Amino acid sequence: MIDPLELTRQMVAIPSPTGEEGAVVDWLAALLERLGYAVTRQQVTPGRDNIYAVRDAPEVVFSTHLDCVPPYLPLSEDAEFIHGRGSCDAKGLAAAMVAAAERLSAEGERGVGLLFVVGEEFGSDGARAAASLTPKGRVLINGEPTENRLTIGQKGALGIHLRAEGRAAHSAYPDEGDSAIERLLAVLARIRALPLPSDELLGPSTLNVGTISGGVAPNVIAPAAESRVLIRTVGPTDGLKSVITDCLTPGVTAEFVAEIPAYKGRAPAGWESTVVSFASDLPFHESWGERFQMGPGTIRVAHTDHERIAKRELLEGVEQYVRLAREMIGRTEGPKDGRAEGPSAAAKRSG
């Protein structure tokens, strides 16, 4: 049987920032072939493949992502935790899914597939490409660190790239120039003052001014400036885009460079559930049937310099994946999946 702790260690030891997932994909695909799966490698971009592994035609598919945010954090361990980049987001979850699928196979249930994608941290290009893979099952269980609770709702994301143009001049003669930084700051102030939508389940939208850059020197009126803003959305975004566009002034433009829809789903009776504020690949897996999302670990340590996953929680995650898969396989019929809030068009980029 697969040891999910050892599998986590082995994958965390292989760096796989978004765009450079090739080494961990090669390693995991070879392992799944040795375990007896029929493995399909789907090229997303050169050197970057999704992995789809099946035995028999699947009823349930486990899925998560293999890419991580930079910088790489090396593997380390203590009595309670496995530390390192990807330990909870999401290589530990991938390991738990492999262990769960192997447990089910040993019990005679071969209708469990494994889908591991690239690119979740920057664009979800792997999840969007995976929509063309076959055969699909009736249920997809997506892995994200939710403290082993089922996600019944998650916010979306809207990325905005603001650019301002001005006119350079000597700072001693400001009337001869036009500061792009001042133009940009004025527009940012208007956007930050907007009342943002709220949802009864998902809560309020939130806005983060992530980066600001511009100018050339303290003694030069800035000829150009830019900012990147991310809004965590809770519903359709057409109205939000419109009011943001109305905040623009001459010389300032806005490009909507990322969009992930908000999502509302359900949890079967008897399952603990949660609502999360982060985005994931889940909205892009609509073609895979009824969708669920859960996994061990907490998102609050993902993307940090102290990312880790508790060994006890990871092992519990295996049990939860096995339990949910058994329940879905044993169900002859049931309610259809909750659908994403807002547009279902694929995003160009994600945050």
Image (cartoon, helix red, strand yellow):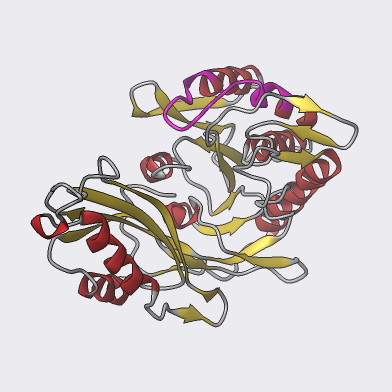
Q: Quadrant of residue 86?
A: top right
Q: Quadrant of residue 13?
A: top right
Looking at the image, residue 115 lies above or below residue 186: above
Determine if residue 264 is in view: yes
Front position in the image: 265 or 122: 122
Q: Residue furthest front?
A: 172
Report if residue 17 lies within the magenta region.
Answer: yes
Which residue occupies 51% across, 25% down? 39
Q: In the drawing, does residue 178 fall left or right of residue 40? A: left
Q: Position of residue 341 (x, y in %)?
A: 42, 70
Q: In the drawing, does residue 245 fall left or right of residue 341? A: left
Report if residue 148 lies within the magenta region.
Answer: no
Q: In the drawing, does residue 6 fall left or right of residue 175? A: right
Q: Position of residue 315 (x, y in %)?
A: 82, 41
Q: Which range of residues does the magenta coloring cover?
A: 9-23
Q: Residue furthest right?
A: 79
Front position in the image: 279 or 150: 279
Q: Quadrant of residue 73?
A: top right
Determine if residue 3 is in view: no
Which residue occupies 24% across, 73% down? 247
Looking at the image, residue 173 lies above or below residue 97: below
Q: Position of residue 332 (x, y in %)?
A: 63, 62
Count all numbered tags in the image, as a single digit.
0
Q: Position of residue 31 (x, y in %)?
A: 63, 19
Which residue occupies 25% across, 50% down? 225
Q: Main secondary structure of the magenta part?
A: loop
Front position in the image: 314 or 329: 314
Front position in the image: 271 or 66: 66
Give the position of the N terminus as an image quadrant.
top right
Looking at the image, residue 284 lies above or below residue 234: above
